[in-house]
Image: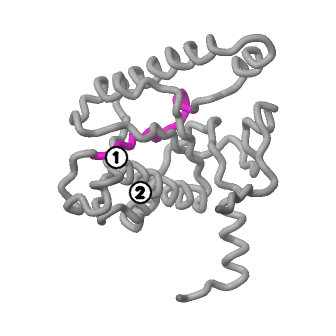
């Protein structure tokens, strides 16, 4: 196997460190050719049985964006009601979506009924299709960040409602809603960590059997 240089390995580690979940975006547009370069990362992603089950929907119309934002606000209010005291106060001050400003917004789905790949590797573990979509998203995320763009994953949503609002096929399941654009600032620290919500582990625990 080809081994990359020490410099490349260091750069890759930097890229992974600077791959942050961005919620604060400038409204500047993203060049379409640049966006296509980033999306092409999906074409290099691994997938179970080479099924390529990812389905990407660009959320561009005012109606679709308004429906997604309404969905988030309702889900966020419900999530806030599950906390109390200091945690509720901290939660209420968190910025958990860039949907108001992000120029590019994508809903990424898994096609649970795809014929591509003939079911190889997914008969016993059908969730492997969704894992494949997540793997592709991570390659996309690194491609985005390497070009100076930011990506934010909005997980506080009602997925069933979003599927209805976007009128996607019944066999598509939502994996993630993403905001993409130019970050207001670049940082290598997670926003939740800076806000005091949680801290990142300094070392990886590994169980041995």
- Residue 144 lies, with reference to residue 80, above or below; the image says below
- Residue 94 lies, with reference to residue 47, above or below; the image says above
Towards the viewer: 184 or 188: 188
Left or right: 30, with 126 as reference point:
right
Towards the viewer: 36 or 208: 208
Towards the viewer: 147 or 73: 73
Let me know if residue 49 is in the magenta part: no
Q: Residues within 10 Å of mark 1 (few under 14, many from 20)?
A: some
* Tag count: 2
Residue 18: image x %, image y %?
A: 70, 55
- Residue 87 lies, with reference to residue 187, above or below; the image says above
Q: Which residue is pictured at 53% across the width and 34% down the height? A: 154
Report if the CB atoms under discs 1 and 2 are less than 8 Å apart: yes
Q: Residues under labels 1 and 2: Cα distance?
A: 9 Å
Magenta stretch in the rendered image = 98-111
Q: Quadrant of residue 33?
A: bottom left
Residue 148: image x %, image y %?
A: 62, 56
Q: Residues within 10 Å of mark 2 (few under 14, many from 20)?
A: some
On-image quarter of the C terminus: bottom right
Left or right: 165, with 36 as reference point:
left
Query: Residue at label 2?
Result: 39
Query: Residue at label 1?
Result: 56
């Amino acid at each position: 196997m080809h081994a990359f240089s020490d410099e490349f390995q260091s750069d890759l580690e930097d890229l992974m460190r600077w791959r942050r979940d961005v919620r604060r975006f400038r409204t500047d547009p993203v060049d379409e050719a640049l966006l296509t370069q980033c999306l092409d990362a999906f074409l290099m992603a691994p997938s179970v049985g080479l099924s390529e089950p990812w389905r990407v929907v660009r959320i561009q119309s005012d109606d679709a964006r308004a429906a997604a934002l309404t969905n988030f606000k309702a889900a966020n209010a419900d999530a806030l009601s599950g906390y109390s005291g200091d945690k509720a106060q901290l939660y209420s001050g968190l910025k958990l979506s860039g949907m108001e400003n992000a120029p590019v917004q994508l809903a990424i789905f898994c096609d649970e009924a795809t014929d591509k790949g003939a079911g190889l590797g997914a008969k016993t573990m059908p969730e492997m299709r969704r894992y494949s979509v997540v793997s592709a998203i991570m390659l996309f995320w690194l491609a985005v960040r390497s070009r100076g763009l930011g990506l934010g994953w909005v997980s506080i949503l009602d997925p069933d409602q979003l599927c209805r609002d976007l009128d996607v096929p019944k066999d598509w399941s939502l994996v993630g809603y993403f905001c993409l654009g130019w970050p207001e600032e670049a940082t290598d620290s997670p926003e939740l960590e800076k806000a005091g919500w949680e801290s990142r582990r300094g070392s990886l625990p590994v169980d041995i059997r």
